[in-house]
Amino acid sequence: INESTQTNEFKGATEETLTNETPHSSECKGAALLSPISKRIFGVFLVLLDVTLLLADLIFNGSKLYIPLVYRSISLAIALFFLMDVVLRVFVEGRQQYFSDLFNVLDTAIIMTPLLVDVVYIFFDIKFLRNIPRWIHLVRLLRLIILIRIFHLIHQKRQLEKLMRRLVSENKRRYTRDGFDLDLTYVTERIIAMSFPSSGRQSFYRNPIEEVVRFLDKKHPNHYRVYNLCSERAYDPKYFHNRVGRIMIDDHNVPTLHEMVVFTKEVNEWMAQDPENIVAIHCKGGKGRTGTMICAFLIASEIFLTAEESLYYFGERRTDKTNSSKFQGVETPSQNRYVGYFAQVKHLYNWNLPPRRILFIKRLIIYSIRGDVCDLKVQIVMEKKVVFSSTSLGNCSILPDIETDRVLIDVFNGPPLYDDVKVQFFSSNLPKYYDNCPFFFWFNTSFIQSNRLYLPRNELDNPHKQKTWKIYPPQFAVEVLFGEK
């Protein structure tokens, strides 16, 4: 991709895509009032409360004209809540646009009618109405209108689905224009990050695959390619006209360096075929694995030169800060490490894999680990196979050193290690997190310097999370000492 194309693509990411995804400032302020999850849940609760009171009134009062003041007061408060919701929506969307939707007109009528009835019952003397024989039938009709509102709520399945999807996607930037509401972000104008295109029950809280297909076919007909980075789930590639690439990466883990090189070259080739070609990349949540691969391509295409720049940019694009400040970029330390490895592959090895280096682990040192580690176990994984486990007798010694606050693990006759290696630790005295273990990490042997790898707490997978810091103090670290033949 030449330099001018890169510059235009980068500008497109900061101008065109922001226009497509992010509401204008006035809309953002209004949306902040309209869309909080807690408000939506509270609204559903109020409707259910209104239904309960209505049913109680119908059961216990029967055909009596008298309706308890307490019920009417609560009903009035509920109606005022929804009236305020309508007023805010009219203010944000504009009167003409809001009332162009027939459902919005019906919703407003259903809110206003019981509201007026409640006001009449509470603030006016209605005893004279007992002499009007048809009035009781009118009251029943108004109660029926309230029931219609309940059925209207039940038929708002689409709105409830949107609520659930927003709960799951948290504050990831979403595409909410042109009739779409998808957990989908234009990282650049030609690179899309999104969550898994789902079907069945999962489509209730994740991107429905039919909607993703409709979006891509409408916005980029015959010019898109989808990449599924999930090892744990798949779909029929026919949905996307068989333009689907698959890379099997476990959740919260890393691709191999070879997969990163092949992926970036393949995407680069696809982009070069036509200036309108784009890629849509996803894992489950469209964050960790997706961000790792997208950041690699940002470096490969020289939009950014360093891992730090590409990781920061992806996080900024994927995070909707108008909703929450929670970071939605690549957080797992090993994934960050592999983006750094790829930057070296691009700049030092001309986009080719570095020479293979074979190493042996001689000693593992764990610093400042709390609790009883008498049953601490180590497992080494390579090429998706366990090549070493300390459960085997006589292959290692584990020695706690209380004076230096360390645990020394000497490995005897360890297997030869090359390329991508995963080391994970197990103990019944330590809580398990991602990957069903207390802590783990990945490395590539070609990038080990001076036969030593030192990883502080923030560079270890699981202990990097703040929720684990009561167990792993700031001094917690793992050091690996290697040998060569």
Image: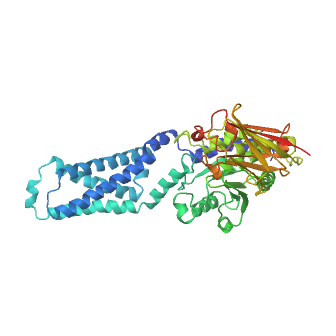
Task: Please tell me whether residue 464 is drawn above or below residue 98 in the rendered image.
Answer: above
Left or right: 22 as drawn, with respect to 65: right
Residue 238 visible to the viewer = yes
Q: Quadrant of residue 321?
A: top right
Report x, y in % for residue 174. Answer: 57, 49
Task: Please tell me whether residue 268 is drawn above or below residue 150 in the rendered image.
Answer: above
Left or right: 371 as drawn, with respect to 397: left
Q: Quadrant of residue 6?
A: top right
Front residue of this view, candidates 437 and 225: 437
Front residue of this view, candidates 385 and 314: 385
Residue at image location 62% in from the left, 45% down from the top? 318
Front residue of this view, candidates 77 and 270: 77
Left or right: 138 as drawn, with respect to 411: left
Left or right: 146 as drawn, with respect to 221: left
Report x, y in % for residue 413. Answer: 85, 50
Front residue of this view, candidates 232 and 391: 391
Q: Outermost residue toward the top?
A: 403
Residue at image location 75% in from the left, 49% down from the top? 422
Residue at image location 40% in from the left, 63% down from the top? 155
